[in-house]
Amino acid sequence: MIVAIDGPAGSGKSTIAREIARRHGFEKLDTGAMYRAVTFAALSRGIDLADEDGVCHLARLVNIVFQPQPGGVTRVFLDGEDVSSQIRTPEVDAGVSKVSAYPDVRVAMLAPQRAVARQHDVVAEGRDIGTVVFPDADVKVFLTADPRERARRRVLQRHEGEQVDLSALEPEIAETLASIERRDALDASRDVAPLVAAADAVRIDSTAYSIEEVVDQISALIEEAQRA
Ligand code: DC
């Protein structure tokens, strides 16, 4: 069984995919983390992100491994080094759209993405899962949410576990909103594998729903597909 969840940054894909994986015993595949790992690898080796050949060559060389941890968290290893937090910095946020728009970087990521689904039932999240990576997925969801709500969720996620009041976070939310809108525009307008809903995807707008409500909706789609 392959469940594809596509949608823009901050729409809740990661959290929802994690919960779906837990409920149904599926493997979770975070394809954004792979593009982030390539971006981090380029930045840390001093490769100019504008150097398409250099970045694509690197994408073919690196080894990216996911290691699920108890509690539902997955750690990301780049050539054996745990880079789980380094791939979530503002520098990587700013560069990843450029890297993920290179056609040969995308080609290099296809085989490892598809390999995961050969061995397990999988819930994969990204931008082109239902259109390019798994066009025959059993369940396809296109998850959206209002941009301001997405920015708010991203910032709250960043400060998880801290005692902070929401009004103090307002400047960070505004900055994150600008970055999200910039990235949405780049991801949606690129030539290869742009962010678009597959024709047969079920669209869910999560702005007004809790995580659990969205997970329930997707679970119902999975159960329906399992019966078919
Ligand atoms: O989901 P995320 O924010 O971690 O994704 C990081 C970037 O990677 C995002 O700007 C778009 C890109 N991406 C992509 O092009 N294709 C995917 N399947 C997943 C992510």
Image (cartoon, rainbow, N blue to C red):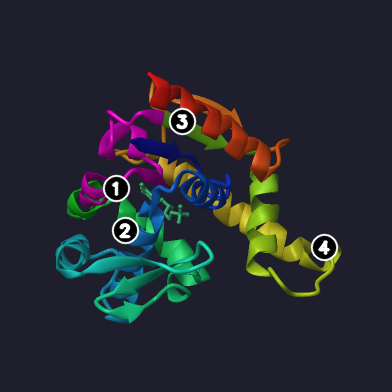
Q: Residue at x 82, y 62 (%)?
A: 166
Q: Residue at x 40, y 47 (%)?
A: 26
Q: Which residue is mark 1?
A: 120
Q: Secondary structure at mark 1?
A: loop
CA gap between label 2 and label 4 equals: 33 Å
Callout 2 environment at 10 Å: few (<14), some (14 to 19), or many (20+)?
many
Q: Which residues are magenta?
A: 115-139
Q: Secondary structure at mark 4?
A: helix
| Residue 116 magenta-highlighted | yes
Q: Nearer the viewer, residue 30 or 3?
A: 3
Q: Residue at x 43, y 70 (%)?
A: 87
| Residue 52 magenta-highlighted | no
Q: Which mark is residue 166?
A: 4
Q: Nearer the viewer, residue 139 or 55?
A: 139
CA gap between label 1 and label 2 equals: 28 Å
Q: Quadrant of the N terminus?
A: top left
